Amino acid sequence: MNSLEKLSGFVSKYMAVFVIVVAAIALFEPASFKWSASYITILLGVVMFGMAAGYRLRAAC
């Protein structure tokens, strides 16, 4: 359970940074993300889950 808490803490702490970095890379080098066009729904779900997990942790503490 401790490892799950550590993972959740890491994701909630750095998810916004990760999303911004990936968005900046995609802005300047869009061809490198052409493979992800068919996975947009899944990737958006992962981002939304990560943001919500971080919000719940901060709200509960």
Image (cartoon, rainbow, N blue to C red):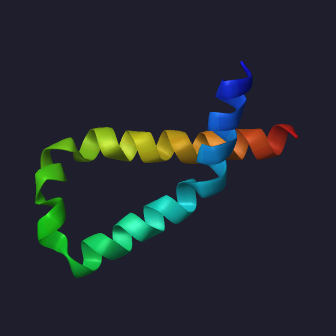
Where residue 57 sits in the image (x, y, percent)? 75, 40
Q: Is residue 16 above or below residue 39?
A: below
Q: Is residue 36 left or right of residue 24?
A: left
In the rendered view of the protein, which quadrant contains the N terminus?
top right
Q: Is residue 1 left or right of residue 44?
A: right
Where residue 4 sits in the image (x, y, percent)? 65, 26
Residue at point 55%, 54% (across, down): 15
What is the total number of numbered labels drawn onto the structure image?
0
Where residue 14 sits in the image (x, y, percent)? 59, 56
Residue lying furthest bottom in this view? Answer: 28
* Quarter of image, res 7: top right
Residue at point 16%, 65% (across, down): 32
Residue lying furthest front in this view? Answer: 3
Question: Which residue is at the front of the view, 14 or 40?
Answer: 14
Residue lying furthest top in this view? Answer: 1
Q: Is residue 2 above or below residue 44?
A: above
Q: Is residue 46 left or right of residue 32?
A: right
Q: Is residue 57 above or below residue 23?
A: above
